[in-house]
Every structure is written in structure tokens, then in C-alpha cells.
Amino acid sequence: MSVLLLDKRVVHYEVLGRGRPIIFLHGWLGSWRYWIPSLQAASTTYRSYALDFWGFGETAREPDSYSLEKQSDLLEKFLGELGISKVALVGHGLGGLVAMKFASRLANMVDRMMLVDCPLEPGDINPRLFSSSQADLADWLLDRQPSGSAARVDALKADRDVIQRSLNDLEAASLRSVLQSGLKIPCLLAYGQNDPAIAVPNGEVLIDKDYYLHQVTLDQCGHFPMLDDPARFQRLLLDFLALESGASPSELQMKEEWKRRVR
């Protein structure tokens, strides 16, 4: 286990591999741990990091730091401590919102982003996410297969207040407006077609021929596509990471694997 101190508070992370840096950012349930298969797949070519946000996993519980802005500050300080000046971000749910918050402030530090099951508007979120306990959410969104066991265990460790605070922050903002504000960072949006928690947006309305945005919907996947179909998710991830810096993620359409899944 790797840790560092930020403002005298413990932040937990893990790292594998060598190469250009990529950071995996977890969602509202679980911790860095459910990224392990993706972390291992990416580490064959990239220096792959995964960290726990404030209030999750083995990172300190700090109620004053549970806002999206403070979690974004955590990411900024983490990169500063490790001397990383340019990074690819892969964020799931909450992690996607933090990635966008970070990119809207420090676009020069972000090479590209992959946002997985990330709500673009408050109305995209099933109200059950606001009101249920971690145990109920885990039963709802995670199946009983071994691949989801780590996320299930770590979901119960999280401070419930951190989930509520981040969702409240989203109510005051629109990720859609940030994406359409002229942010010139290649961004791939990936959604599980059967996700009961986050509504799949209309890709044509969202993208509107934007060079930097592209959306893929993964059929037969729910809220955790990296666990529901890890092989396919990892192929999509690695295909995206392999694009030239600054290239449009819409180039993924040229690959037969993704043609029929683009929405």
C-alpha cells in the first residue's frame, strides 16, 4: 500500500507500470480497488495510478473536504507531489465529475479524459442514489459475482456524507455545460446501457459534431462496465489511450469493434 500526506492527512494510492501517466478515479461506491483489472491492463504500456478520494477506502475522512472542488484539489496536490505535469484521467461516476472539475481549472495538465457512467445533469441521476445506504446501493448496482466483491466491501467503508455532498454539488452545476464550453480536451464518454443509476444521454444532442467529444454505449453493461465486461472495457480504454495526443476520440468509430455501439 502506498500513501502520501497532503495537508498532514493520509491519501492512499496504488501504482503499476511505466510510461505516460494515467490516473483512475473511482465512483460513489467502492474505492481504487475495483480498478485493479483495468490498472493491470493499462500498466503494460502506461504508468497507472489509482487513488482513494477523501472519505473513501484508506484515505482520511475529512468532512470539510467532501465537495467536488476539494476532491479536485486533492487530485491537483497529488499530481504535484508526484511531479506529474500532464496526465490522462479515467473517472467513473463521482470520479468523472472530479476529473471534469479539475480539467475546467487546469486544462493544460490533462491530455485526455474517459468519463464512465458520469451524469451530465442532476436529472440524469436516479433519486435512489441520494437516499439509500451504501449497503442498499451495493445490492442494487453490484452483482454477486466475485469481480464485484472488492467494490462491495469497500463501499461499506465510505463515509455516507461524502456521497451526499458530491451529489448536492452536482445539483448546482451542469457537466453538459462544461463539456460544451469549448474545453479542448479529447473526451470519451462511456455508458453502460443497462445502468439503473445514471441515464444514458442522447449522444447526438450532446456532441453536436464537437471534435473533442465522443460517446460509446456498452450493451449488456450496468453501472460498473469495467466489472461487467472487463475485456471489452479494457479494449476500449486502450484504444482511446493509443490515439495520438489531441486526436478526436471519434476516430474510434473506425474500429469495427465500436461501430455498432456508438450512440
Image (cartoon, grey):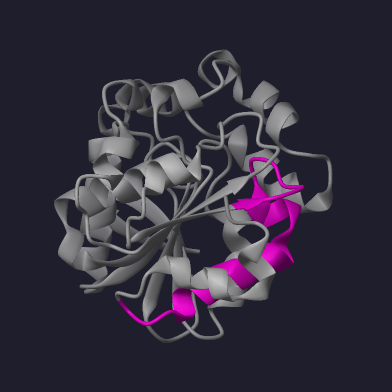
Q: Is residue 135 visible?
A: yes
Task: Single out the residue that lies furthest toward the right.
Answer: 145
* Residue at horizontal 61 percent and vertical 63 percent from the top: 36
Q: Is residue 6 visible?
A: no
Left or right: 141, with 88 as reference point: right
* Residue at horizontal 70 percent and vertical 38 percent from the top: 194
Up the image or down, 47 lies above or below 174; here it is below
Residue 32 or residue 97, whichever sits in front: 97
Residue 99 or residue 200, whichever sits in front: 200
Left or right: 38, with 78 as reference point: right
Res. 200 image quadrant: top right
Up the image or down, 250 lies above or below 219; here it is below
Residue 136 or residue 119, whichever sits in front: 119
User: Residue 240, percent across and down?
Assistant: 49, 71
- Residue 169 painted magenta: no
Up the image or down, 131 lies above or below 159; here it is above
- State which region is magenta: 217-245
Res. 248 image quadrant: bottom left
- Residue 222 painted magenta: yes
